[in-house]
Image (spheres, rainbow, N blue to C red):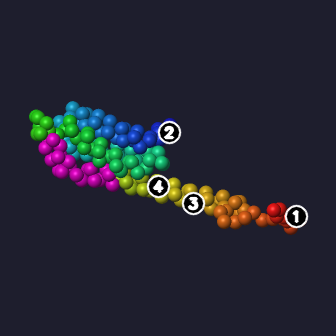
Amino acid sequence: MRRLPNPRLTGLGSGLFCVASMFALAYLDLLLFDASLTVYGVLFLPVCVLTAVWVRRADLVTAPVAVPIAFAFGALPLAEGDGFGDRLMGLVTALAMHAGWLYGGTLAAGVIATVRKIRLMGRKSAARRTQAAAHPATRPGTAPARSATAPARRRTA
């Protein structure tokens, strides 16, 4: 079985991936489903999961921040209205009426990022404990033991 892609995106890269994906999916939704915000919301959930899974460990906090921005940006083509003001009101209405999808996707990204962070902290802690057990003389606050046969140093003034 072939392995699935496992990219590691930076914080900016994961945000761009999410925004570009949602914008492309919005136009696909507009083309195939006549701007159904329910279909858009359903498509939003896997994008949130992929964003949270593919972001680098150092940038985990960016995943729950980027996904609601991407939802709003992607909803621009789906918002009803002719002029700028009408389209802006359509966007606000769409965000208000479909906030459940927005909250659900943000929650999914947040939970995945939190679990990944907890696992990372656990691994680091276990590695520190293993290193401290393997090298007891290198623990902070302990001086290396002197051998009994080594001569003591004399102070010279």
Identify whether 81 is placed above or below 98: above
Residue 125's tag is 3
The secondary element bearing badge 4 is classed as helix
Residue plotted at (12% across, 39% down): 85
Q: Earlier in the sequence, mark 1 or mark 3?
A: 3
Residue 13 percent coordinates (x, y): 40, 39
Tell me, yes or no, whether the two marked residues, 3 and 2, touch with CB atoms within 8 Å.
no
The secondary element bearing badge 1 is classed as loop
Q: Spatial distance from mark 4 to mark 2, Cα to Cα?
A: 24 Å
Identify whether 7 is placed above or below 101: above
Q: Spatial distance from mark 1 to mark 4, Cα to Cα?
A: 50 Å
Residue for badge 4? 117
Q: Which residues are magenta?
A: 88-107
The foreground one among 144 and 7 is 144
Mark 4 burial class by Cα count in 10 Å: few <14, some 14-19, many 20+: some
Q: Spatial distance from mark 1 to mark 2, Cα to Cα?
A: 61 Å
Q: Residue furthest bottom?
A: 148
Residue 128 percent coordinates (x, y): 61, 59
Q: Spatial distance from mark 4 to mark 3, Cα to Cα?
A: 12 Å
Residue for badge 1? 151
Residue 3's tag is 2
Q: Earlier in the sequence, mark 1 or mark 2?
A: 2
Residue 103 percent coordinates (x, y): 28, 53
Q: Earlier in the sequence, mark 4 or mark 3?
A: 4
Tell me, yes or no, whether the two marked residues, 4 and 3, touch with CB atoms within 8 Å.
no
In the figure, is residue 50 to the left or right of 129? left
Disc 1 residue type (three-letter)? Pro
